[in-house]
Amino acid sequence: MKKALIFAAALLFCVAGAPCFQPGTPLGSAPAPAVAQAAQRQEVTAQWTSDAPASPRDVFVADKEEQHTSVLLSSPKGVKNFKVLKLFLKQIDNDGKPEFLVKELHSQPVLAPGRPLEVVLTFFGTIPAYGISYVDSTGKTRYFSLDMSGKDGSVLLTEF
């Protein structure tokens, strides 16, 4: 009976609008410092082209299906060996992290500051079909999928 009352009180607390835990964070733990550091190291940003001010840009057309859209990729400091990738889901590991096979669709020696790249593409469902890679300022090659947020519809770059 005592356990049932504690459970009911906890459930009422959660239903009242106060989150019981931060989504994606195991119970009893704080957000991982590595996640915050990874966000700070990200040297390329993505946004819908329609949300960006008009400016000179390069354009790459990945596909022009009927429901295509375009994403603007930019780098305030510039990155080397920039690539647009086609992603194919290989598997999802035990921690829920996807592994992709990649095919290079477009490459350029640098994604320069002040010269973004507009990529025309189609989002096909919930599994990312496109991504990018680049060599960051430390010399490490980094890989990101292009995702669409389920919360607000913004463009996300998710490292894999």
Image (spheres, grey):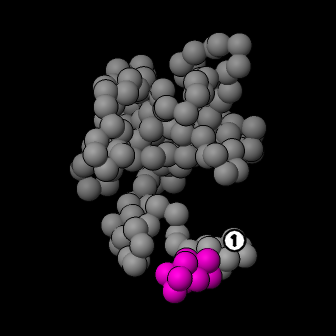
Of 55 and 132, nearer the camera is 132
Residue shown at 58% from the left, 28% from the top:
125
Residue 97 lies, with reference to residue 69, above or below; the image says below
Which x, y percent locates residue 132?
Answer: 42, 35
Of 81 and 88, nearer the camera is 88
Q: Which of the 4 quarters of the picture holds residue 52?
A: top right
User: Mark 1 — residue?
Assistant: 15
Residue 4 lies, with reference to residue 96, above or below; the image says below
Which x, y percent locates residue 118?
Answer: 60, 31
Residue at the outermost bottom position:
2
In the picture provided, is 146 more to the left or to the right than 99?
Answer: right
Residue shown at 71% from the left, 13% from the top:
66
Of 49 and 110, nearer the camera is 49
Residue at the outermost left position:
139
The segment highlighted magenta reads 1-10
Q: Which of the 4 quarters of the picture holds residue 103?
A: top left
In the picture provided, is 75 more to the left or to the right than 103?
Answer: right
Helix, strand or loop at disc 1? helix
Q: Majority secondary structure of the magenta segment?
A: helix
Q: Is residue 64 something one can see in this rendering?
A: yes
Q: Quadrant of the C terminus?
A: top left
Residue 146 lies, with reference to residue 8, above or below; the image says above
Which x, y percent locates residue 3?
Answer: 49, 81
Residue type, label 1: Val
Which x, y percent locates residue 46?
Answer: 57, 44
Residue shown at 51% from the left, 54% from the top:
76
Q: Which of the 4 quarters of the picture holds residue 70?
A: top right
Residue shown at 67% from the left, 77% from the top:
12
Local crowd size for mark 1, using a 10 Å CA cut-off: few (<14), some (14–19), many (≥20): few
Q: Is residue 59 something one can see in this rendering?
A: no
Of 10 and 30, nearer the camera is 10
